[in-house]
């Protein structure tokens, strides 16, 4: 393990080129304490490539990755021994049970402690299914087994590439319970990638947004949203509210949401100020509310996701 002054994971100016494709254009990531971190980006942003580089499965074009202060390029085996990774399609022996699969992986790592494998099966909610053949597991059960497998070596860092892909709402809810437990009870640093913001905002305390091979933003959802509070105004005379605000120059952007609701972006103005202005001008305002940008808004603002130019 690493001492307190050393970041658990440090990615420095990481670049990866595949022929003419610049998959990563010099990204930096620092994770310096246990927690559940989100790595959010649209398809093709570079998430899986980043994880493969961290796991020593690809060589970077340039840049450096340190795990607990150890350079993945220079001491790959030692560095990645602190890592557990789950990729999209983990491979299992379908004719062996979940428990037997874990014990095979355990022995590959030179470990014999079946107790730990059993405890991990319990932790991921497969305690009751451990003696069933993996060939009969659902997609969600295979995902959970993958997490148990990634935890076998007791890694400090767990990289999960789209762990909620293909899970039903119950599976996602389970994941939402499991991952914080790993962070807060087991002291793990969990980095999970996703292109679904609502999931990341529910699971992660810290988010790094990647887009087209570059880091677009990094921080808590709260920090990322501080710049731009929207003000929602409800009035039967929404047309007039729009006119008044446009003429006043107070708002930089107005979005019409329905016949009676508008959203206003008014830098430096509180909801109370906007409300007072409208009321003073004789408008009947039936509701006013300050809304922080959701992670979804931030994501679209920063990535322009929906553009199909990957
Ligand atoms: N082996 C490869 N050879 C060539 N190009 C590659 C290779 N692997 C990835 N790329 C390219 O690198 C870019 C980033 O891909 P990557 O798989 O890391 O994205 P991602 O964020 O994981 O996307 P997704 O959400 O679709 O999984 C894409 O343009 C992709 O086409
Ligand atoms: Mg991917």
Image: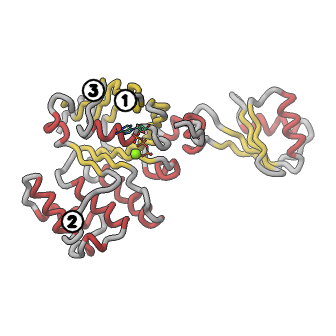
Q: Quadrant of residue 77?
A: top left
Q: Is residue 295 left or right of residue 69?
A: right
Query: Residue shown at 9%/58% (left/top)?
Result: 107
Mark earlier in primary sequence (1, 2): 1
On residue 261, which mark appears?
Answer: none
Structural crowding at the residue carrying mark 1, measured as other residues with C-alpha within 10 Å and reported as few (<14), some (14–19) or many (≥20): few
On residue 64, which mark appears?
Answer: 3
Rounded to the nearest angstrom, the CA distance separating label 1 from label 3 is: 20 Å
Residue matched to label 1: 19
Residue matched to label 2: 93
Structural crowding at the residue carrying mark 3, measured as other residues with C-alpha within 10 Å and reported as few (<14), some (14–19) or many (≥20): many
Which residue is nearer to you in this view: 270 or 154? 154
Ligand 2 in which quarter: top left
Rounded to the nearest angstrom, the CA distance separating label 1 from label 2 is: 35 Å
Query: Residue shown at 21%/47% (left/top)?
Result: 155
User: In what element is the residue under mark 3?
Assistant: strand
């Amino acid at each position: 393990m690493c001492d307190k002054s050393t970041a658990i994971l440090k990615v420095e100016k990481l670049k990866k080129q595949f022929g003419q494709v610049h998959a990563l254009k010099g990204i930096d990531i620092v994770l310096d304490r246990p927690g559940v971190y989100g790595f959010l980006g649209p398809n093709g942003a570079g998430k899986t490539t980043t994880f493969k580089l961290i796991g020593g499965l690809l060589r970077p074009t340039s840049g450096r990755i340190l795990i607990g202060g150890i350079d993945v390029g220079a001491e790959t085996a030692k560095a990645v021994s602190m890592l557990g990774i789950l990729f999209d399609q983990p491979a299992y022996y379908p004719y062996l049970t979940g428990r037997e699969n874990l014990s095979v992986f355990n022995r590959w790592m030179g470990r014999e402690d079946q107790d730990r494998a059993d405890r991990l099966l319990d932790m991921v909610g497969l305690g009751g299914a451990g003696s069933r053949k993996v060939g009969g597991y659902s997609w969600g059960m295979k995902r959970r087994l993958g997490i148990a497998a990634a935890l076998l070596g007791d890694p400090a860092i767990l990289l999960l590439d789209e762990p909620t892909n293909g899970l039903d709402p119950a599976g996602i809810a389970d994941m939402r319970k499991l991952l914080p437990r790993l962070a807060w009870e087991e002291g793990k640093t969990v980095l999970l990638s996703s292109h679904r913001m609502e999931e990341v905002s529910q699971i992660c305390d810290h988010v790094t947004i990647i887009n087209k091979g570059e880091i677009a933003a990094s921080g808590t959802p709260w920090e990322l949203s501080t710049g731009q509070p929207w003000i929602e105004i409800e009035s039967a005379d929404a047309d007039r509210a729009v006119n008044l605000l446009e003429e006043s120059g107070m708002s930089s952007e107005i979005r019409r949401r329905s016949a009676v609701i508008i959203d206003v972006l008014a830098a430096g103005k509180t909801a109370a100020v906007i409300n007072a202005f409208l009321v003073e001008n004789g408008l009947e305002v039936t509701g006013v509310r300050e809304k922080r940008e959701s992670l979804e808004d931030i994501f679209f603002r920063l990535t322009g996701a929906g553009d199909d130019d990957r």
